[in-house]
Amino acid sequence: MDISIIIVNHRSWKPLEVCLDSISEITSPKLKFEVIIVDNFSNDGLFDHFVNKYSNFIFIKNNSNTGFSNGCNIGAKNAKGSYLFFLNTDTTISLNALSILYETYKKYPEIGILSCLQIDKKNHYFNQKKIFPSFTQVLGITRFFYRKLNKKRLQKKFNTHDNLFYPDWVTGSVIFISKDWFQKVNEWDDDYWLYFEDVAICKKIAQNKGKIAVTRDVTIFHEHGGASRIDFETECISKTEVIISNHVYINNHFNSFNKNISHFLLIIGILSEKIILSFLSLFLFLNLKLKTNKYILRNLCLYYYNATKKQTWLSPRSVNYQK
């Protein structure tokens, strides 16, 4: 088996169906691949329907929603391929894309993780010019000034016409990695329930002298938010987990001095923002996006209370969280 395509699903059946249909159309006498779908406890009665419809694919039913990282690790443990291709449910893939990623990865042994260009339904390309989070980029305002002050260096790093360019990290929606590299960096980090797990695995690749690469020869459609914003509740949870995972990353990868200040700045900055936006939502109550801030604020207050009580920055949803 050459490639194991691994997809983690949680109630994202409609985009998943489009994704699996695109994979079903791939036929290649040279490239052998399998498809593994890990369902993170959708528990909505649709699992068996998909198992029957896509009987040539492997479905694994998780007995709880253990998050993206853990779902990916479950899929990888059942994978037979020499290469692992992690895909979001809201992506579509073609034979051409799969073949180019496979051949490119084999051609450049210095690559640890390979991704590609991504485009949404409005024909907008995703920002792939990613740099690792640092003390100077904890808040939006500090990120703005960091990019302004380092504009020339960042332009030199990313403004290249080569087929490959090398960001610090790539999103977990499209990640191609050999099983050897995957095992070398000890899989995805289960500390993260959702978000920042892609930054963390790329960080481990870089620390082991591997490169993170994006090829311009492939473009994959990705309906951003198609998996994480399927309803109001899910969107509130997802946006809360972005902030929580930011704290987890700071705790795991910043030094002691920067760690404490970064946690403090993030808490003050985020709570101030959410309090102001929650207040505005009282007057603009028809604005649904504004309304989410009230629920995110509630979720964060509960998280910070438990973080103090339990002495951990982990999300209560993480499999590594001590109940």
Image (spheres, rainbow, N blue to C red):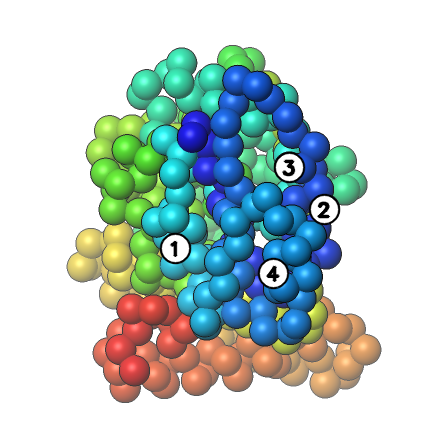
Q: Picture quarter containing residue 46?
A: bottom right
The residue labelled by disc 1 is 74
244 versus 109 height, above or below: below
Mark identifier at residue 228: 4
Q: Tell me if label 2 and label 1 are in contact, CB under 8 Å.
A: no
Q: Residue at x 59, y 80 (%)?
A: 295
Q: Report, in whole angstroms, how far the alpha carbon at label 1 lies from the one at label 4.
A: 20 Å
143 versus 33 height, above or below: below
143 versus 273 height, above or below: above
Q: Report, in whole angstroms, how far the alpha carbon at label 3 lies from the one at label 2.
A: 9 Å
User: Is residue 134 shown to the viewer in this render?
Assistant: no
Q: Report, in whole angstroms, how far the alpha carbon at label 2 lies from the one at label 4.
A: 16 Å
Label 4, secondary structure: give it. Answer: loop
Q: Amino acid at mark 1?
A: Ile
Place of residue 18 in the rendered image (x, y in percent of width and height, measured from the top left): 72, 46
Q: Nearer the viewer, residue 247 or 322?
A: 322
Q: Residues within 10 Å of mark 3 (few under 14, many from 20)?
A: some
Q: Tell whether 219 sits left or right of 184.
A: right
Mark identifier at residue 23: 3
Place of residue 120 in the rendered image (x, y in percent of width and height, measured from the top left): 71, 41
Q: Report, in whole angstroms, how far the alpha carbon at label 2 lies from the one at label 1.
A: 23 Å
Label 1, secondary structure: give it. Answer: helix
Q: Nearer the viewer, residue 158 or 118?
A: 118
The residue labelled by disc 2 is 18
Judged by depth in the image, the label closer to the viewer, 1 or 4, is 1
